[in-house]
Amino acid sequence: MPNSVVFSDVDETVIRIKSMFRFLEFYLARRGEPAGTYDRLLGEIRRGADSGVPRHEINRRYYRFYAGEEADRLAAVGKDWFAHESEQGLFVPETRRALDEHVAAGEPVVLVSGSFFACLDPIAEEVGADWAIGTRPVIRRGRLTGEVLVPMIGAVKGRAVRVSAAVRGVDLAECTGYGDHISDLDLLEAVGHPVVVGADPALNAHAEQAGWRRLPLAERSVA
């Protein structure tokens, strides 16, 4: 059994985009919603964020858009969305290469994200991840209620990493983590080999002070 696990954030770490919002746009178009619906819903989210609504509450509000939707249909749309995005260059090349090296070395990869199964499952399959830990929508009789169990945001990511390591019986000091934003700090602090992806000022300042490894991205990698 491997004695280490690789934990990685997803949006703008493994992939170049914010999966939740790009998926929402694709989903609304697939559902035949009128033009402008996506901009209206995105505006609601942005106004909340601008007014100081916490990230975990923003995450909860996002999933209310899917209330009543069949989980199986969302999963199917997720596969189509992934195929569409992949045609446009979905992955961050630098991180993808790093994950490929981990997989080739036999290290399990676990994705940790505020996104959900419709987006994460096809990404996990493509990169060879063993598991994707995302925000879990509440599902009753096969349909999303619009509520979630716990948003996989901030400190919750760190707790998920620690629990996952304990379940697998691995030493966190031997584990590697990848993240691109200061909200990934708890995830990165939980592992012995944190890697900061990209140029987020707050996270890079912390990385410099802590002596963490940094993975700069070529300009082409930034969506």
Image (tube, rainbow, N blue to C red):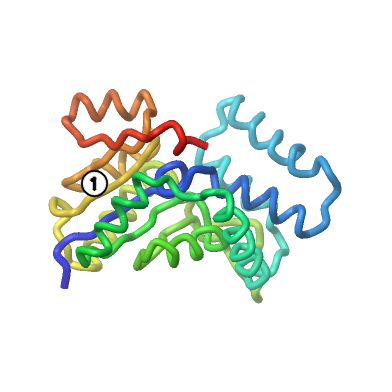
Residue 22: where, in percent of width, then height? 62, 47
Is 122 above or below relative to 26?
below
Toward the viewer: 54 or 17?
17
Secondary structure found at label 1: loop
Toward the viewer: 53 or 207?
207
Is 206 above or below relative to 172?
above
Q: Residue at x 32, y 33 (%)?
A: 216
Q: Residues within 10 Å of mark 1 (few under 14, many from 20)?
A: many
Toward the viewer: 172 or 92?
92
Residue 204: where, in percent of width, then height? 30, 27
Q: Amino acid at mark 1?
A: Ala
The residue tagged 1 is 190
Quadrant in which residue 163 is drawn: bottom left
Q: Is residue 84 left or right of residue 94?
A: right
Q: Residue at x 60, y 68 (%)?
A: 75
Q: Is residue 117 left or right of residue 111?
A: right
Which quarter of the rendered picture does the N terminus lie within? bottom left
Q: Residue at x 36, y 43 (%)?
A: 155
